[in-house]
């Protein structure tokens, strides 16, 4: 074992020892125990591993994180306010802990459950079944195991068969306490019954100066012909580390549409894993990321077509406006029997400054012949002629550049169906490019 | 080990026409690998002390290395102790001084392969260096080249005759520490080709090396070094074949190219090592490290490869674009059928300003073949206005094969522009139907469509090679459709 690996072990040991024994129900203790065992067996994370080739974790390991205490917290009025024009059912977590008094869950349709993982003990079997089934999955690594070894909270959402939700469900994660580096480990579970339809919005943010590691693990289970639209806005504190690992389980003819907007965190990584095991399912992943000074933003996507007639797409666009690094690793695998697959993958990057870096790796792995598959990537800068054109029409350079960046991302923004949300994201992009893009 | 006309005919039917064994007495070192073997190889070649030191240094480093596992290949375990690292046709006395003294059996064998060694009959304008197993057996047109100041000889000879050039450049592009197979090559390489084009000289004819593995249980470890001084130009061709055998044979070569200011090196390969039979028995394991350094400004290196043979191909001809305005090109057709596996592609490392690179890769998979493109495009922070375009297309014939694309793109300069496109599809039924309705047989139709698919690459090959490559492709795909 090398010194680096030894340090990693010690870091984990310290975290696990620092965590109080779970006071929760028995199934939770079982999940913790199983995950601790897995932690022992999993190999250490290393830049030599393909999945971590471009994403170092040294800064993470240098920090001594502690789990946040269970306590009621409050938010300032402006933090509490919902997005303008957006009406949702809300689950609010402050400093990693669920806050029922800040959440808004009135008027949910019959049979729909939205709440914290622990407060819904009746559904523990679902969680357990899923988490155990997935545990041996391909993408388990130290951080997902760490999540399960410590998680005692998280969002639990269940929409029964045939129910179509009129309003989006919103999960808000806000960190306010800058007194210690927190380790936040939400374990989320979203279950959609047959033909159920829902929209889910996740927002992650932290007050300036807060330092924490958000190590989230989410299972999304879609029943036959269910539809889920999933927006994620990662706007963490610039001193935070953020990892979201999402695992998608889709029944026949179900459709998942996910879009992530990443602005914040010094180090962030989003993992999205889908395996198609039933015909006619669709999975569309998209994302827009802005990378500024000192930031690392990483997307790792893996879509596996194991059966015929599924469709998938991955469309990601990034703007690097500061000395940061963007990492994109997308894979489409089409197994031997997955004929008539339709899969497309694209990643485009705009690099506006010197000393930034883009590492992109779009991969196709295809074992069937009757398929439509393609991928494309590009890295470039703004077209000086376009900037000149806008300037000749009287726009200041900054505004011209900002407009072109928005134009670059516009096709993905337009895919956001909810108008209020789209406005919010657009203005965040504008803001970010004004404040820091220069 | 006789090769009668009948067996040759059988082999042609089996789809590999170069599967015969040359019946010639060979001088072979017994299998095994240790420092003594390396000393013996070096002694047999009468090498100077510095060369032996270089080999031993590489060998000691190799012992600390692990074979690479990252490629998308099912690799058999290779027993490095079961391989013989040196095998050469027995020399008569001092070795041939001119072609007249070369064993007529050898000349006959090369004629059979379509490589005439006798100069008067040779294709006008192509000089050939023929390498059999571990050594170069003949080099043609040497005098004519010498007039132009071009050095074209075997590596062993270069080590003796031009030690300062070899010492200066050997390992300068591919150091012995580079990778497992390159390191092994540095320790045990037996021969290869050395080319030196002096300043301002345009090489008067195409240069070519023909590699042939003959002896059983041997490995071929050749080393090629091409140095093009400022303003010079050279086009170099390489072809390879091997007899059909049930066991795998190892081929681990290293090719280094150095291009100075305004120099242009064009390197073309038609690789047709024995691919193994339909069940995947036997065949050549082809692990090759090829790398070119565009050292001077405005230099240009172009790789063109047609890979139809080998059981396993692991090969990434690369360009390091160090000089400002230098150009790197990679054109590749890789075909896998039967149980063949290929993991091939390129690396374009842009360091200088205004450097440009083009990658065109066409992968064709048939039968149970697995074909992988793996490529890296890196734009270093100083690579102002660097430009790359990559195009990777895969064609699948049949539903048991696989086509994979793993591009790596790393950009550290905002003025650099990188584009990568890839598609995967099967042979279009509409196009096939159209051709057939015009009276073409199914096989002709497939061959026409596949040749069309590869056209962008074939047109980069020198004319004689392009014809051979097309023929080879047709032969390789015969019976793959239906």
Image (cartoon, coloured by chain):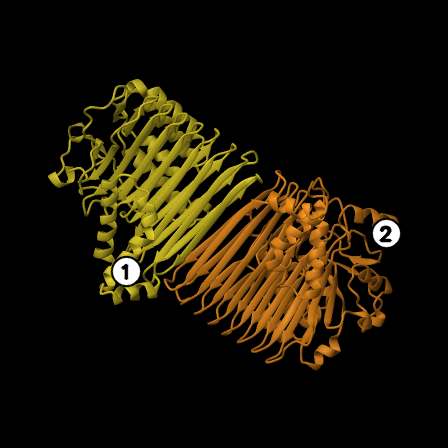
Image coordinates of residue B450 in percent, x first then y, are 64, 51
Q: Is residue B450 left or right of residue B378?
A: right
Give the chain of mark 1: A
Figure quadrant of the C terminus of chain A: bottom left
Which chain has been coloured yellow in this picture? Answer: A
Extreme residue in the front direction: B438
The percent position of residue B252, horizontal first and vertical second, equals 65, 55
Q: Is residue B227 left or right of residue A302?
A: right
**Cα separation between marks 1 and 2:** 73 Å
Which chain can be seen in orange? Answer: B
Please name whichever residue, A321 or B427, is drawn nearer the observer in this view of the structure.
Answer: B427
Residue linked to disc 2: B3
Residue at 47% in and 71% down: B325
The x, y position of residue A170, in whole percent, is: 24, 33
Same chain letter for marks 1 and 2 = no
Q: Is residue A123 left or right of residue B74?
A: left
Quarter of the image with the N terminus of chain A in it? top left
Other-residue count near label 2 (Cα within 10 Å), few / some / many at <14 / 14–19 / ≥20? few
């Amino acid at each position: 074992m090398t010194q680096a690996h030894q340090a990693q072990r010690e870091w984990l040991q310290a975290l696990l020892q620092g965590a109080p024994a779970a006071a929760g129900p028995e199934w939770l203790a079982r999940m913790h125990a199983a995950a601790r065992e897995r932690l022992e067996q999993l190999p250490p994370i290393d830049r030599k591993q393909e999945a971590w080739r471009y994403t170092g974790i040294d800064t993470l390991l240098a920090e001594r994180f502690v789990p946040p205490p269970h306590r009621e917290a409050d938010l300032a009025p402006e933090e509490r306010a919902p997005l303008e024009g957006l009406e949702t059912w809300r689950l609010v977590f402050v400093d990693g802990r669920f806050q029922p008094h800040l959440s808004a869950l009135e008027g949910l349709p019959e049979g729909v459950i939205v709440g914290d993982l622990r407060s819904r003990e009746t559904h523990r079997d679902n969680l357990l079944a899923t988490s155990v089934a997935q545990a041996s999955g391909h993408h388990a690594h130290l951080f997902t195991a760490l999540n399960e070894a410590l998680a005692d909270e998280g969002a639990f959402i269940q929409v029964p068969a045939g129910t179509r939700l009129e309003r989006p469900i919103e999960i808000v994660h806000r960190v306010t306490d800058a007194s210690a580096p927190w380790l936040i480990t939400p374990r989320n579970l979203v279950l959609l019954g047959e033909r159920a339809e829902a929209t889910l919005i996740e927002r992650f943010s932290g007050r300036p100066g807060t330092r924490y590691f958000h190590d989230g693990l989410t299972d999304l289970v879609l029943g036959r012909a269910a539809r889920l639209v999933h927006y994620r806005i990662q706007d963490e504190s610039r001193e935070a580390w953020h990892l979201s690992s999402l695992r998608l389980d889709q029944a026949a003819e179900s459709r998942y549409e996910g879009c992530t907007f990443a602005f914040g965190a010094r180090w962030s990584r989003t993992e999205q894993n889908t395996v198609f095991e039933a015909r006619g399912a669709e999975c569309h992943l998209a994302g827009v990321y802005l990378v500024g000074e000192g930031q690392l933003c990483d997307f790792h996507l893996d879509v596996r077509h194991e059966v015929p007639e599924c469709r998938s797409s991955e469309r990601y666009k990034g703007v690097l406006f500061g000395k940061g690094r963007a990492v994109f690793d997308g894979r489409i695998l089409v197994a031997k029997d997955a004929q008539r697959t339709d899969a497309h993958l694209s990643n485009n990057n705009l690099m506006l400054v010197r000393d930034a870096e883009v590492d992109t790796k779009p991969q196709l792995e295809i074992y069937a012949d009757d398929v439509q598959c393609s991928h494309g990537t590009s890295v470039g800068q703004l077209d000086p002629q376009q900037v000149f054109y806008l300037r000749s029409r009287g726009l200041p350079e900054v505004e011209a550049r900002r407009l072109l960046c928005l134009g670059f991302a516009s096709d993905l923004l337009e895919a956001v169906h909810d108008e209020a949300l789209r406005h919010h994201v657009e203005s965040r992009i504008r803001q970010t490019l004004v404040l820091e893009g220069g | 080990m006789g090769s009668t006309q009948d067996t040759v005919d059988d082999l042609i039917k089996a789809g590999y026409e170069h599967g015969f064994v040359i019946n010639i007495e060979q001088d072979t070192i017994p299998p095994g690998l240790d420092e003594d073997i390396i000393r013996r190889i070096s002694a047999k070649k009468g090498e100077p002390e510095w060369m032996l030191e270089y080999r031993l240094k590489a060998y000691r480093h190799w012992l600390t290395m692990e074979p690479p596992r990252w490629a998308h290949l099912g690799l058999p375990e290779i027993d490095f102790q079961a391989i013989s690292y040196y095998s050469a046709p027995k020399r008569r006395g001092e070795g041939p001084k001119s072609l007249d003294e070369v064993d007529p059996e050898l000349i006959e064998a090369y004629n059979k392969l379509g490589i005439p060694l006798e100069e008067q009959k040779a294709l006008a304008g192509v000089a050939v260096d023929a390498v059999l197993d571990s050594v170069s057996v003949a080099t043609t047109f040497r005098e004519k080249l010498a007039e132009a100041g071009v050095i074209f000889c075997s590596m062993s000879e270069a080590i003796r005759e031009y030690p300062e050039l070899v010492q200066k450049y050997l390992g300068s592009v591919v150091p012995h520490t580079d990778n497992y197979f390159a390191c092994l090559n540095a320790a045990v390489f037996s021969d290869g080709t050395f080319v030196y084009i002096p300043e301002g000289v345009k090489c008067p004819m195409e240069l070519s090396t023909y590699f042939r593995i003959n002896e059983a249980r041997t490995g071929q470890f050749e080393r090629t070094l091409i140095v093009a001084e400022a303003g010079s130009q050279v086009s170099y061709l390489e072809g390879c074949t091997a007899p059909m055998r049930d066991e795998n044979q190892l081929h681990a070569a290293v090719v280094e190219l150095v291009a100075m200011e305004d120099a242009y090196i064009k390197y073309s390969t038609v690789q047709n090592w024995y691919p193994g039979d339909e069940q995947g028995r036997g065949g050549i394991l082809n692990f090759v490290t090829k790398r070119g350094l565009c050292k001077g400004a405005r230099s240009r290196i172009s790789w063109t490869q047609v890979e139809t043979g080998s059981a396993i191909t692991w090969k990434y001809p690369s360009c390091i674009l160090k000089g400002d305005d230098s150009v790197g090109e990679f054109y590749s057709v890789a075909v896998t059928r039967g149980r063949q596996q290929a993991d091939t592609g390129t690396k374009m490392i842009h360091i200088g300003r205004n450097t440009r690179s083009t990658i065109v890769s066409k992968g064709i998979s048939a039968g149970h073949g697995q074909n992988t493109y793996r490529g890296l495009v890196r734009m270093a922070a100083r690579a102002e206005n660097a430009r790359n375009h990559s195009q990777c297309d895969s064609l699948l014939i049949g539903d048991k094969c696989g086509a994979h694309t793993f591009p790596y793109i790393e950009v550290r300069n905002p003025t650099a522009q990188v584009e990568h496109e890839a598609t995967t599809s099967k042979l279009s039924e509409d196009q096939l139907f159209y051709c057939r309705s015009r009276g073409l047989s199914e096989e002709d139709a497939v061959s026409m469509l596949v040749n069309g698919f590869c056209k962008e690459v074939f047109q980069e090959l020198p004319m004689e090679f392009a014809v051979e490559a097309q023929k080879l492709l047709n032969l390789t795909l015969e019976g793959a459709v239906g």
